[in-house]
Amino acid sequence: MAAEWSALLLTCRRGQGAVSALQRELEVRRLRGALGPRPPALLLAVEDPWARLGSGGATLNALLVAAEHLSARAGCTVVTADVLRDARILILHMGRDFSFDDCGRAFTCLPAEEPGAPAEALVCNLDSLLGTMTHRLCVGSPPGVWVCSTDMLLTVPSAPGISWDGFQGVRVIAVPGSPVYARNHGVYLTDEQGLVRDIIYKGTEARIQQCAGPDGTVPLVCGIVFFSSDAAEQLLATHVIPPLDACTYMGLDSGAPPIQLSLFFDIVLSMAGGMTEEDFVKGGSDASVRSARSVLWTALRGFPLSMACIPDASYDYMTTSASDHIRSLTLLPGSASHLRFCKTAHSHVDQPRLLEDGSSVTNCLLEGAVGLAAGSVIQHCHLQGPLEIGPGCLLSGLDADSSPALRGCPLRDVVLQGHHVRLRDLPCRVFTLTGRLDDWQSPVEEATYLNVPWPEFFQRTGIREGDLWDAETPRRSRCLLSARLFPVLHACQALGLQDVLWLLAPAGGADERLAHWRTAWRMSWQELLPCLDMAAELGTRQALFFLQGQRKVRRVLLGHQDSSLLPLARSAVHEGYHEAVLGTLDEVASTAGDAGVAARALACIAEVLGCMARGEGGLRSGPAANREWASAFGCLERGDIASGVRELAAERQKWMSRPALLVRAARHYEGAEQILVRQAVMSSCQFVTVGQSELPPLGHWVQVACPARLDLSGGWSDTPPITYEHGGAVVDVAVLVDGCRPIGARVRRIPTPELRLVSLSGAPPSQAVTELVCQELEHLQDYCQPHAPGALLKAAFICTQVVQFPSQKPLRVQLMESFGSGFEVHTWSKLPHGSGLGTSSILAGAVMASLYRAAGKAASTESLIHAVLHLEQRLTTGGGWQDQVGGLVPGIKIGRSKAQLPLRVEVEQIPVPDGFTQTLSDHLLLVYTGKTRLARNLLQDVVRNWYARLPSIVQNTDALVSNAEECAQALRQGDLPLIGKCLDRYWQQKKVMAPGCEPLAVGHMMDTLRPHVHGQCLAGAGGGGFLYVLTKAPRQREALQQILAGTEGLGNFSIHSIEVDTGGFSVEVVGCDTKDGAHPGEDRAV
């Protein structure tokens, strides 16, 4: 579950010029899907009307803005509190500036990745809090207004246990903490009913102890409060009453004098049960605040203020201590956190072994040998080694140009940051350097700089106090915060990192460095803060994220890694970096020298184009044979991948203008990818060995009859490219259906040099359904179009090399020179279309076996398995190998393929206990569901998801293979219940692989049969066709017939017996009348 927000507002301090940048950040999160399944209709970044408004004033202003926008959306012409009645509003406060991140605590990046997120992105504290509020803390709360600070790291368990039954008024959220920690923070004092009596900030030990619970912990103020709709309405009503009107932009526009209010100590405290009106009002800092408190007391005092303290939650305020900040980024969060910290997050590191445990790297590009000691953090840096960073360091915002200055510089216990600063309209880069142990505000006599006392620093560098502070600056105001240490501009030279690094260890040329430093215009951190350019900083972080993302693309593809690039593709599209990612994918595809890598890169390009269509433009699956792409496809077919990729990219530029064209371009990239997959699979041709045999007499039929196959586990792992990128294993059983082998073909030579292709309605002597005669090579050119008449038979003639295509020799000449005859082929199947029993692949095997023999050739079963693979790639149906293994190899077996090319299938017969083959036959039944499956679309979706390396698909593929091995072991043991478990598990795995493969009627049928079976599964890809069941009792055909007949809504089903076929497919030569027109019924065995 997730909270569904009506409005989400992010407030920021006035004067930072960051509203537009923050609005973009919110919009990007909406696109990423980070704001819940139904993102808020109203998403706003709101600037405080005054520079020092305080959290209370910011809350009131944001509430007014939300109410105004919601009122306008409701068609109102004035602000009405009625819109708050059913609204769920979340207000997040950016809060104060932060010494260690120019974008504030909200956008401080955490060393975490979210593999399951739909779009890949840096995880900021804001994202963590949004996830906590949306998916945990606020779930189940009534309409109202949540207000949340962003100045803390908060961890909340998935089930916080807050009861909202009978809730009224206002509720504060607390987390348990130690009394020691509470000395520098706020705690709640509550009564036995959980109502707040007081808020104690930095209280005495005795006062804090009053708040302790039975376990010794105290409820810490964690910056979160909830106002019911009634309370929010009353708070909103105060915005028109002076002096509270000064908290809002309306007050600013009306000329009201500024006022500063605290959310907790001015607004929330007014409802604390232990406060009196007199004490509360006179606690205001000045007359205007006291007047405001009086208004708030009148408006809110009647609402009960309750507290919910969340067990197992944790709260860590982000202080100005560098040591605390480094610790928070290098320690793993508690078990209740929804985040998992990692050593390297969203970073490319050339030599990860140089990063010690306990260090942290986020959004970085570390090239070459960059060593990082434990207890150090690098964020948003592009560094080039060799570099060595010692312990206790925080580096942020450094680009590649900074690397030379860092080499040989002793970095230990320092904070080194690069900043984007805007001085009026002049953008510039400024570097700051401080010590991990330094305190920003302690007077110079008591403090340190670069971890040493100021006098020692002055002596070491030659810098004087007068260089840093004006003479009139009072002694108590002379501190690190106000020291003009950091060069910003120089009249003669460009400034760089070296202009602050010399402060660490002045060596040779120290006098020159000092003189250069003195002649630069310098600023203090206090002066720099208002000039920080948040928009530029966010933009630089974004550019670096996608730069390391491009390295990730190369690393994943060239390293054959099972990491998904789809989330990165989505982010690139959301944030306008799709061209950079497309360029990287083009480069990888054209230079990899590996058809498998190139195919995956093309599939990734298709994903980017699909994302650019943003769900419009039609279905992703569709035709991919537009002539505009033919030249590029031709290059790929010829094996010239580099030229093919270049032509694809050039053609792509013509298809980028609207969603419909983008989707069609994506289809053609998938078509291009399939060309490379076909070429990879056709490497299996080397395992096809064809010998010579006696040429049967003219007019004699070579007839092949094949069993169907049941896939008991592992299917989909045999499908290219999964089978050669991951490795596959499938347990198959050859079966007779209703006592016969249902699939067959026969071939004979005929006097006329032509090809007669006949499809029969059943086994001979059944009537012909379709007939086709090919007399010219041109009649074979549509062999690669699966739906063309006779395409499979045409492909079989070409793949067996009975016919050479293309060729300069006419078909008649080829046939007469090689065989002195033409050929007639009959095929049949007693199974319905889309049965799921492997019909098309087994039929291809039957045709090739009979064709080889009729042409005077001999091929082993292993050769036939690989020949069918080859044929199906030429046919462009893209099938796997399990069907032909199941139908051409007798009995019970497991086929396997390794994660490598060339693709080779190895088959192992599974030995079973004596009598178990008959037992299995007695317990297996086929139920025809009456539903026709569409495996082609399922196959396209599965291959697309595999190339995207969706984590669920990768994990499921692992499970398919392991389940196949477990099923094989269960068969060896003759354990029917365990085999049934494997079948059920296999069906669940199929549904993960191809969602939507279980029609409602089939699900109903399976539910009906479940009490009577050990296990059940739809055959093949699912979606319809045959359901096979392993019954608990033997020979249950009639019993199941009665059960299903008495169940409504199942449609036209039928039940069929099956029997394990231990003999395998049969090949026989039968004679006939030598006249071309001989009827199949006149055949005679030879």
Image: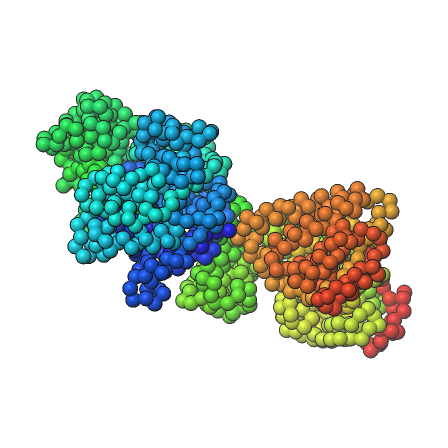
Q: Which residue is pictured at 16% across the width and 25% down the height? A: 462
Q: Quadrant of residue 526?
A: top left
Does the image show residue 554? no
**Residue 1025 versus residue 307: which sits nearer the camera?**
307
Q: Position of residue 486 (x, y in %)?
A: 21, 36
Residue 953 at x, y percent in the picture: 58, 50
- Residue for point 48% across, 48% down: 165
Q: Is residue 336 above or below residue 48?
A: above
Left or right: residue 932 compared with residue 460: right
Quarter of the picture containing the C terminus is: bottom right
Rendered view: 504 above or below 195: above
Residue 564: x and y, percent? 51, 49
- Rendered image coloring scheme: rainbow
Residue lying farthest bottom?
Answer: 1077
Visible in this render: residue 68?
A: yes
Q: As drawn, is 520 to the left or to the right of 613?
A: left
In the picture, measured across the screen, residue 920 lies left or right of residue 475, that is right
**Pick the front one: 116 or 256:** 256
